[in-house]
Amino acid sequence: VFYCTHRMDGLFLTLGRGCVSFAPEMIIVVVLATGILYFLRYGNVLLRILQGVFVKKHEFAPKEAEPVPMMRTEPPPNFWARDLSESKSRNEDSPPPQLNPVVYGYGNSGAFQESEESWDRPSVPMGPAFGDSRMKRSSFGGKPDWYRMISNVEGKSRPDSVFHNVEEEEISKVDCDSLRGFMDRNSMRSRNVWKSKTSQQINYADYLQLDKILSAQELETSKWDEPVHDEHMFIVIHQAYELWFKQILFEIDSVVSILAQGHEHIRTPQINISCSRLGRVVQIMRILVQQHDVLETMDAHDFLEFRDFLAPASGFQSKQFRILENTLGMSPDQRIQHSGCPYFDQLRFSDRQQVIDTETAPTVLSYIGSLLEKTMESLEVGNFDFAAYMKAAINEAAEHDRKAILQHRTRMSPADERKKLDELEKKREAHLRLFSEEEHAKLLAIKIRKLSFKATMAVVFVQSFRLQPAIAPLYCLITRLVDIDELMGQWRHRHSAMVLRMIGSRSGTGGSSGHAYLEAVLQRSRIFTDLTHASHYLLPQHALPPLPRAVSVKTTVPA
């Protein structure tokens, strides 16, 4: 129509110019055709105009703005409910409930059906239908506990069973007390912050006590001779070490206080906090290792210029480092006597007792062992035995390898075949011995192992299923401790190498054998060896059979 009217416009103009030469009938036909085409094109607009003239005004009055949709205040319809008449007919012979609403069993609809006195809430489908066999139940239509806790329709009281027979008033009181304590704490903090701002004008130098710190670099050479330039850097480096040791002990002590609560009170948030703080210790240890780069900018000649003035002082006499070793879990048996005397004899007399007390105090290693033991006990659901589980997996993996060797026997000589089969059998037997409690007891007796058999099995379990949500925090904790142990080894190695570089095979200023002593300590100073040796127990992920369902559920739900 649009195309025809457009073409007719041009035709009409052409005819208009020469209309005197056409008959009147022709003009009338052209005008009518043009009008029809224009009506077809613009008739909708004309009809709306005419409709607005002849139709009542209120019918076309602008509508009021629709209200903004808000959250539903009434319960949604119960799509799972049976027909009301059928439900009533079935319940006519049943006596009305006295205390709790009666909830019948599964019906044809596949959902729990509630009696008339139950809450006016939709039921939740809980499973397949079981015909018309019905059982009276004391639950509420399959609704979860949180649903019943927040529901209070038409003033109906909540069932006491939701709160384990605890009075609702008591729960409200606890909530109010918690809120009141929260508000009081915030109010007190605000007052204390304002009081601190108005009572003093704190300064950066005063806050950090820089006057004490920056005036603590007294050169020993300047007391007796001309000062040596590099001694200043030597002092600053070791003061920085001691400050970082102080921070490390601060973090380790906080982790010990968390682990000391016991397995029953330790939850995933506490383990995550411990991982975070141990991660901070890891980063500090990396800084300590890197500080050797600064110390090694001093060559041997520069060090010899002031070394003789330092005797008998020695880094061996660091009280904080000895406390750190003992707190992490280094045993006295790992110590190497210094000049035929116990290590604490080299400390100041006022520091000895504090260091000796840390030898008998609970350590990070002991707390981790207890935590791992309790974790393994919580995973031993039913008849599940993780050691037996791993033995079966080892035998299955070895059988697959044996079949693969026999399948490709044509590519090797009979002697090579026997050799590979013998190696496979030895490997299988050695791997099985790792999961023998009797063999582990022998390793504990000769002090090759420190953790119990159950704790060791827990380490293997955690590393094998580290990706499970409930296991991941423990894996993080174990990894952080292994990182600390490795970095302390790196620090000792860099120290030993630097001593060899600076003084060669000379004796130390404290009376030790120098580099030889440091190398001997390096070989015996590892603390968390049981955590690292657990890798020897592992199997490839594809060789691990599925866990029992009860155990698998525990690994997926964090505590």
Image: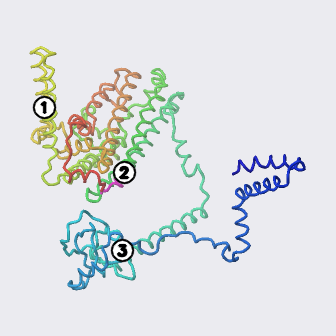
Query: Mark 3 Cα within 10 Å, few/some/many (few <14, many 20+)?
Result: many
Residue 66: x percent and y percent?
Answer: 59, 71
Tell me the CA gap for discs 2 and 1: 40 Å
Where does label 3 land, which residue?
Answer: 121
Q: Earlier in the sequence, mark 3 or mark 2?
A: 3
Mark with earlier residue (3, 1): 3
Q: Give the range drawn in magenta.
A: 266-270
> In the structure shown, which secondary structural element does the residue marked by tag 2 occupy?
helix
**Residue in the image at 30% along x and 81% along y:** 116
- Callout 2, which amino acid? Asn
Residue type at mark 1: give it.
Glu
Residue 221 percent location from the top left of the image? 50, 30
Which is nearer the eye, 490 or 423?
423
Dot label at residue 399: 1
* Secondary element at image label 3: loop
Determine whether label 3 and label 1 are within 8 Å by CB.
no
| SS at badge 1 | helix
- Residue at 21% across / 83% down in the picture? 94
Outermost residue on the right side: it is 20
Res. 272 mark: 2
Relative height, residue 543 to residue 187 (above, below) = above
Q: Where is residue 79 in the image (x, y as percent from the top left)?
A: 36, 69
